[in-house]
Amino acid sequence: MISLNKDSKRAKSAGNAAVGLGGGVDEEFRGAVPGRSLALSTPKEFFRHYTVVLALIVTIVVFGILRPQTFLALSDVKTILTGQSALFALALTLTVALGAGEIDLSVGGALGFSSVLIAYLSAVRHISVPLSLAISLLVMLAVAAINSFLIVRIQVNGLIATLAMGTVLDGLSQAISNSSTIGNIPSRILKIMQGRFLGVGMPFWYAVLVGLIIWYVLHHMQSGRFLYFTGEGREAARLAGIRVNRIRTISLFVSALGAWFAGFILVGQTGAAQAGTGDPYLLPAYAATFLGAATIKPGRFNPVGTFVAVLLLAAGTTGLQLFGLTDWVTNVFDGAILIVAIGLATLVGR
């Protein structure tokens, strides 16, 4: 009886802590945290919240001065936004998984696999586009189910499980495509992904819509606050009555859906698909999400910060390419940004 009373008090205490955190989050989302406006008026707090935004501005100004006729050309800006659409979609959905405390390293392989599978079904097997998309989506949901079963139910280390899954998907992509490029993508897919609005490709606007949905859910719905509670302390969230396992599972499904959608964007933009195309997106996606956690809402993975971070990565890599630097410089830049991002996110989180 005494033990039960102690457990009850412990759960109540954790629940009160979570409720207190929830109250703070509610106020934060409404912009009514006591002293917030005063805190942002100090240079230290301002830089703490907007370091990445300022870095983006500085990057644009520097490359704009050095390469004004190319870097600042409106057509080039539109091209950059359109070309980064797949990364936008992948990083924004990855923000959900990271917010719940899950690291999904299979998204790169999943992106490449979904693009190859869509191309194979529609261009090689000549299955209708809607059915091809539905089949590929169901396959990606099955991948998410396997990941969540291994990680959430069996409690396999998430890094190992998702890394292995990504490797499996890369191998399946090679098998399906026979290690060659699949072309002749149906025009219906190309029309969906190659249309333009305000001069910018439709995939960018699709990614913006995804980001707005994620932003609203995370910052204006109870389920979003529960997701953050889960990522910040699973045991406390569980004692507070939050269904932690369900939230973790849903977050893994969201990252898989993001990989599928990014693969769809990629095959529609390029008009072809081949194995391994998703691997180069893994590092920039994580660099963007961790860098985004160091801005806007420091210490917390948030879609607005991720969006700004993707723009910074795009501006930096584009500026370096305008100087005629080779591809290895881009890899060094992305890797260095990831190291800095993790360091900043960790320090700001503390």
Image (cartoon, rainbow, N blue to C red):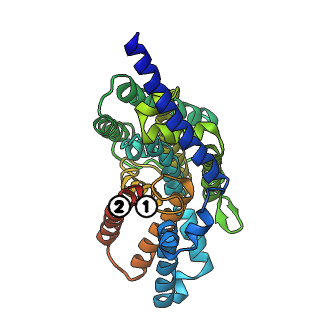
Q: Residues within 10 Å of mark 2 (few under 14, many from 20)?
A: many
Residue with the mark numbered 2: 338
Q: Is residue 7 visible?
A: yes
Q: Residue at x 43, y 26 (%)?
A: 10
Q: Are marks 2 and 1 in contact (CB under 8 Å)?
A: yes
Q: Position of residue 133 (x, y in %)?
A: 58, 37
Q: Position of residue 216 (x, y in %)?
A: 65, 47
In which quadrant of the rendered image does the N terminus lie? top left
Near-viewer residue (249 or 28): 28
Outermost residue toward the top?
Answer: 1
Q: Residues within 10 Å of mark 1 (few under 14, many from 20)?
A: many
Which type of secondary structure does the marked residue at label 2 adopt?
A: helix
Which numbered disc covers residue 58? none
Q: Position of residue 339 (x, y in %)?
A: 31, 62
Outermost residue toward the front?
Answer: 2
Q: Residue at x 29, y 36 (%)?
A: 164
Q: Is residue 118 visible?
A: no
Q: Residue at x 42, y 34 (%)?
A: 234
Which numbered disc covers residue 291? 1
- Give the residue type at disc 2: Leu
Near-viewer residue (38 or 258): 38
Near-viewer residue (108 or 227): 227
Which type of secondary structure does the marked residue at label 1 adopt?
A: helix
- Give the residue type at disc 1: Leu
Image check: 232 left or right of 223? Answer: left
